[in-house]
Image: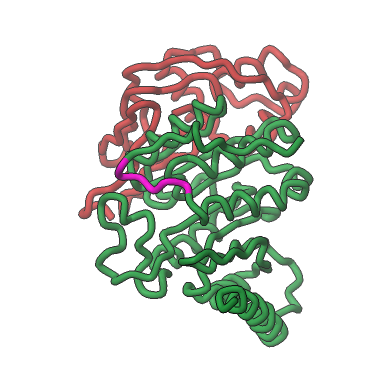
Chain colours: A red, B green
Amino acid sequence: MRLITHNMLSCNIKGVTNGFPLRIEAGNVIEKEVEFNPDFLRHMFAKLEWKALVEGARSMGYAELPEDSPDAAVLESDEAFLKKLHHALLELHLEEGALVCPETGRKFPVNKGIPNMLLHEDEV
Amino acid sequence: MPPRIAAIPLVSSHRELYEPCDDSFALVDALLADRTHLIENNPKVCMEIGCGSGYVITSLILLLKNEVPGVHYLATDTNPIATRVTKETLEAHGVHADIVCADIASGLEKRLAGSVDVIVVNPPYVPTPDYEVGMEGIASAWAGGVNGRTVIDKILPVVDILLSEKGWFYLVTLTSNFPAEICLMMRKKGYASRIVVQRSTEEENLLILKFWRDKDEECQDKEISSSFVSQFSKSISSLMEKQWR
């Protein structure tokens, strides 16, 4: 699971209102290079919750992202920043671990890079 | 040179998993037929709901990746085996999608609302008794309940949430699923539709439908109803004719 998808996942248990972001318990994290595409990053940036990304990256062992969400100028021309964003968002893979709901503490396991969001009968 | 799609020898399999079949091939043919338009539409986020073996999502990535380089691909399935097999199929073809084991898009809906530019679905569409829907194992890949519509009707509102303004939705149906009714339901939510591919095999009459948001609000009810009915009557007649020959 990469942070681009973690940033889009929230707890789906019935009645939970504060289910984002899911806290990452990192067991095994690997890195896989992908091609750098600044336009794609700029497009996705608008949808990202920045604090969730920074915290998620830190949980996966990457602490290079700035705490505060960058402004438009940085996004447009700061290649060093874009490379960090690229790395955090797209190149870190949580292979084994868990995603934890901030409201209920429910753990959604991640195995072989795939988070399991299936709910038990009483959670639906 | 024709665009590359997933190669069957590289598609992973499992005894509890639905293997690519006529319906999967028809859906990929629909995407191939629409490839130029897909590329022009410049999608940024694409998703398959119910990825099974991974054949369709892999094909989608392969047919877009050279012309549309920066895309976020997602695939979901309720069957954990399917998610693992999809991962193997993607890796065998040297491509990547983020995979989530989930019921339709549960867990992703809130944050991805209005963000997905292409959604492809080959649902469990076979008319079966209701109790067979969602049973563990391979039957969950085809069991569709009454008129084969139980899972389809659960998926449509989720697609409506996820699809972006310019988004496109491709759906595999049988004539037994009352596709004209599906199109009318979607019309009421503001979607236009058309048949991209139709294929009749010995067992099935398949229709691959495409939906997109249509901003023209003057085209309501009556006019569209009659044109749908005539469009589907023609398709169904021609499919029936082929069967009788």
Please report the residue visible at 51 percent of the width from the left and 56 percent of the height from the top.
B23
Residue at the (33%, 30%) spot, across then down: A110
Is residue A3 visible to us here? yes
Residue lying furthest left? A122
Q: Is residue B18 magenta?
A: yes
Image point (31%, 29%), residue name: A98
Report the magenta residues as a range.
B15-20
- x and y, in percent, of residue B174 in the image: 51, 68
* Horizontal and vertical percent position of residue A73: 76, 24
Left/right of residue A50 with respect to residue B71 in the rendered view: left
Query: To which quarter of the image does residue A58 belong?
Result: top left
B77 above or below B139?
Answer: above
Camera-nearest residue between A94 and B208: B208
Query: Quadrant location of residue B168?
Result: bottom right
Residue A43 falls inside the magenta stretch: no
The total number of labels drawn is 0
Residue at 32% over, 18% down:
A27
Q: Is residue A18 visible?
A: no
Residue A97 at x, y = what percent?
32, 24
Of A33 and B7, the residue lying toward us: B7
User: Residue B97 or A80: which is nearer the viewer?
Assistant: B97
Relative to residue B186, is residue B75 depicted above or below?
A: above
Residue A101 percent coordinates (x, y): 32, 37
Does the magenta stretch mainly form a helix, a strand or a loop? loop
Q: Is residue A118 left or right of residue A42?
A: left
Quadrant including the N terminus of chain A: top left
Left/right of residue B127 with respect to residue B236 in the rendered view: left
Q: Quadrant of the C terminus of chain A?
A: bottom left
